[in-house]
Image: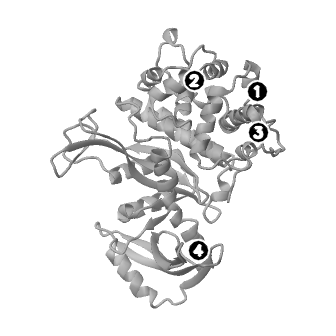
């Protein structure tokens, strides 16, 4: 596939020669997408210090992190599988040698040995720079809420669980039978879009400072640390935080006001009782603050909205926070034709008006679920194996987790980009197939060095599927 500024659709393929050509084109999609956005491999990790002595170093840091990308993008699931499927393959070895000037693909243990010596903060900065590149190039501008705010969903999730303590920073939980679990959760800030992107912006690891703390670290404490880091790293980025009810309260409201952020926080009937009560009382006196909306392919989804502004919430420290509440009751048919109604409700910093409530609900508050589905679920159950212990070393496990975030980001750019649609104009079925096809292409295609180097050209266009 000659990738140029003008896209050329590809026809239907068949036969061994055509399959080999398709695999070569897929490699060009992969390497070209990376080069298009993030430059050369050396440029990509130039901010990460390599503490290894040069005299005993065979593999550059860029080559090791790229090997980690392959591990996750190809859904190999473990360092052992990486050794068996990538390191032990001749075609793979040749391409890796051309790209990085080495004779062999690094062993999974080599990755581990290098990763446990890196600075997680510096590797986190690589993730931030990848997102910043997309922002700077305005790739994500079409997905802004109200044409201004980037949606950042923040939530916690479990990562690793052990039956025995493996480091001083484990959190503990005692089961009913007395069994103690040692676990490592994380809290993630992901930039999400209604089209299904869930790009990690920043990670905060939830961990105890030592085994003898009287009060364990928790998601809320980690949220405040993460928010501070996020503001420092992206001080002028207009954000709207999408949060679940755990975060609804005075500290979050005050934090967002101080940082100049907007928020849409899921509000259950049992949350913030005074806010819920005032919403119900005031909405009866504001009949003009309600509307009906019909949507859906067959115009069979009915949404009933109501909202109230200027609700005064007083927190436990007697600080007053003006908030608004938006409710949407959606009625739609299930596959049998039976109609069901679901209630969605948010407490928000936005001042609500009739033109705003529909986009705030459908393109804002409801997009929070992308962090669960396209984010955590994809990384745990979609082939990335985020809950696998790639290392028990406390530093290396963080590096592997952050490289996973890079790989997931790149995988999404590849899956939704126009280059891939040229190679597979009829689609490829389940998204997991992309990892399978990419692995097969990396293992099977034998190319001369000059062709490998030409797989990542300098100039071309990538357009995204916005449907």
Give the secondary structure at mark 2. helix
Disc 1 residue crowd, few under 14, some 14–19, many 20+, Cα 10 Å: few
The residue wearing badge 1 is: 454
Give the secondary structure at mark 4. helix
Q: Tell me residue 58's x, y (percent).
A: 54, 13
**Residue placed furthest toward the left:** 178
Q: Which is in the foreground here, disc 3 or disc 1?
A: 3
Q: CA distance from mark 1 to mark 4?
A: 47 Å
* Nearest to the observer: residue 89 or residue 41: 89
Dividing the picture into quadrants, the one containing residue 145 is bottom right
Q: CA distance from mark 2 to mark 3?
A: 34 Å
Question: Above or below — where is 223 with respect to 314?
Answer: above
Q: CA distance from mark 2 to mark 4?
A: 47 Å
Question: Above or below — where is 54 with respect to 32?
Answer: above
Say whether disc 1 or disc 2 marks the residue closer to the N-terminus.
2
Left or right side of 391 for 410: right
The residue wearing badge 2 is: 63
Give the secondary structure at mark 3. loop
């Amino acid at each position: 596939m000659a990738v140029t500024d003008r896209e050329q659709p590809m026809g239907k393929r068949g036969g061994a020669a055509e399959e080999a050509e398709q695999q070569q084109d897929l490699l060009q999609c992969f390497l070209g997408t990376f080069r298009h956005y993030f430059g050369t491999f050396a440029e990509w990790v130039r901010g990460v210090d390599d503490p290894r002595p040069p005299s005993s170093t065979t593999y550059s840091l860029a080559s090791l992190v790229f090997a980690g990308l392959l591990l996750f993008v190809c859904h190999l699931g473990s360092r052992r599988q990486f050794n068996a499927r990538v390191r032990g393959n001749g075609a793979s070895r040749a391409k890796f040698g051309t790209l990085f000037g080495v004779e062999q693909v690094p062993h999974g243990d080599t990755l581990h040995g290098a990763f446990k010596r890196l600075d997680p903060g510096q590797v986190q900065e690589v993730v931030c720079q990848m997102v910043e590149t997309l922002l700077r190039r305005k790739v994500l501008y079409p997905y802004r809420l109200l044409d201004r705010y980037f949606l950042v969903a923040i939530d916690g999730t479990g990562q690793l669980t052990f039956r025995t303590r493996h480091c001083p920073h484990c959190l503990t939980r005692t089961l009913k039978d007395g069994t103690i679990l040692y676990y490592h959760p994380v809290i993630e800030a992901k930039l999400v879009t209604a089209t299904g992107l869930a790009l990690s912006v920043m990670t905060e690891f939830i961990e105890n400072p030592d085994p003898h703390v009287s009060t364990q670290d928790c998601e809320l404490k980690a949220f405040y640390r993460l928010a501070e880091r996020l503001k420092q790293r992206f001080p002028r980025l207009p954000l709207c935080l999408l949060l679940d009810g755990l975060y609804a309260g005075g500290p979050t409201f005050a934090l967002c006001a101080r940082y100049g952020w907007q928020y849409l926080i899921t509000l259950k009937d049992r949350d913030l009782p005074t806010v819920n009560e005032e919403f119900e009382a005031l909405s009866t006196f504001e009949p003009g603050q309600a509307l009906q909306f019909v949507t859906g392919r067959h115009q069979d989804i009915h949404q009933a909205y109501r909202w109230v502004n200027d609700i005064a919430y007083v927190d436990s420290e007697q600080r007053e926070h003006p908030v608004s509440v938006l409710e949407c009751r959606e009625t739609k048919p299930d596959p049998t034709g039976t109609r069901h109604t679901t209630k969605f409700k948010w407490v928000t910093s936005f001042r609500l008006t009739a033109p705003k409530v529909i986009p705030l609900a459908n393109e804002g508050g409801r997009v929070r679920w992308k962090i669960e589905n396209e984010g955590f679920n994809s990384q745990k159950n979609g082939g990335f194996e985020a809950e696998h212990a790639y290392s028990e070393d406390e530093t290396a496990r963080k590096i592997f987790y952050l490289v996973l975030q890079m790989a997931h980001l790149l995988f999404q750019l590849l899956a939704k980009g126009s280059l891939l649609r040229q190679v597979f104009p009829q689609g490829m079925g389940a998204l997991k197939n992309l990892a399978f096809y990419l692995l097969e292409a990396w293992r099977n295609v034998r190319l001369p060095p000059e062709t490998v180097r030409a797989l990542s050209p300098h100039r071309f266009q990538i357009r995204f599927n916005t449907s």
